[in-house]
Image (cartoon, rainbow, N blue to C red):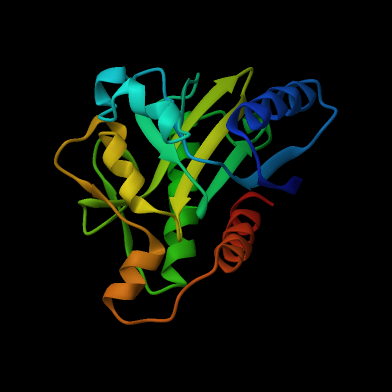
């Protein structure tokens, strides 16, 4: 079974605490695997493989711009969340599926690739790098997870209609030679109609249900 929850726009620390509580319930067998959707006010997060050297914005300006910086226990390096980005927290009991983190990451990527295809975008994987890309050099979705007792937490961040200029505050994922993009930006290039985060979330929900139910 897979439960879907929508937490709306939520402070990053509050969401992380709710994740920890939910992960504990799933580990105890008191809750099914759960996919949480939400958005966050502007926040920079640094994964276990990350470094503050990949934050370009001087520390004196973090507070001025209302941007938090948080060290987290997920894999990966530095990323940024902001409104209009669809965050998906994948709190899954892998023992119900496959006890294989590489398999799980590829499944998340495939769900995102299938989701953005509904909006006319061809997502690809880049060898050695987790996430979903367009034309191998524009990242549209970052992915980083944590796993304890075969229950995962954290998940993915899909750029839908968020302010991409804020990514200039960081070197995303510590990668210097690639760009970030969003579904909205790519559709604007083709003079296509705007997308809504709600539409993307609905399709993403269907893709995860198809893969994990």
Task: Please identify the quarter of the rendering in which residue 188 is found.
Answer: bottom left
Residue at left 40%, top 64%?
183
Q: Residue at x 34, y 21 (%)?
A: 59
User: Which residue does the image show at 59% across and 32% down from the upper left?
Assistant: 12
Examine the rendering and report whether any part of residue 132 can be seen: no
Residue 154 location (% of width, % of height): 55, 32
75 in relation to 84, above or below: above
The residue drawn where x is 45% and y is 39% is 105
Where residue 118 appears, as percent x and y from the top left, is: 47, 72
User: Picture coordinates of residue 190 (x, y %)?
Assistant: 29, 79
In this rendering, the answer to whether 72 lies above or below 184 is above
The N terminus lies in quadrant: top right
Q: Residue furthest left?
A: 177
Q: Is residue 194 above or below residue 152?
A: below
170 left or right of 98 in image: left
- Residue lying furthest front in this view? 64
Q: How many marks?
A: 0
Tell me where residue 94 appears, x and y as whole percent: 62, 32
Specify the farthest residue to the right.
30
Residue 7 left/right relative to 123: right
Whether residue 135 is visible:
yes
Nearer the observer, 142 or 60 = 60
């Amino acid at each position: 079974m897979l439960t879907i929850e929508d937490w709306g726009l939520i402070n990053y620390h509050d969401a992380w605490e709710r994740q920890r509580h939910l992960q504990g319930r799933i580990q105890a067998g008191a809750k099914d695997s759960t996919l949480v959707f939400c958005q966050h006010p502007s926040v920079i997060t640094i994964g276990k493989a990350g470094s503050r050297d990949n934050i370009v914005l001087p520390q004196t300006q973090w507070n001025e711009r209302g941007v938090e910086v948080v060290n987290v226990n997920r894999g990966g390096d530095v990323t940024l969340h902001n409104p209009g980005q669809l965050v998906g927290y994948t709190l899954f009991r892998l023992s119900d599926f496959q006890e294989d983190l590489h398999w799980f990451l590829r499944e998340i990527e495939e769900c995102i690739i299938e989701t953005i295809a509904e909006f006319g975008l061809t997502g690809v994987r880049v060898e050695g790098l987790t996430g979903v890309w367009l034309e191998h050099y524009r990242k549209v979705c970052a992915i980083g997870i944590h796993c304890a007792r075969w229950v995962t937490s954290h998940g993915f961040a899909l750029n839908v209609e968020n302010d991409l200029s804020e990514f200039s505050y960081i070197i995303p994922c510590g990668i210097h030679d690639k760009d970030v993009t969003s579904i909205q930006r790519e559709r604007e290039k083709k003079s296509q109609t705007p997308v809504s985060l709600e539409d993307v979330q609905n399709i993403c929900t269907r893709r995860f249900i198809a893969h994990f139910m």
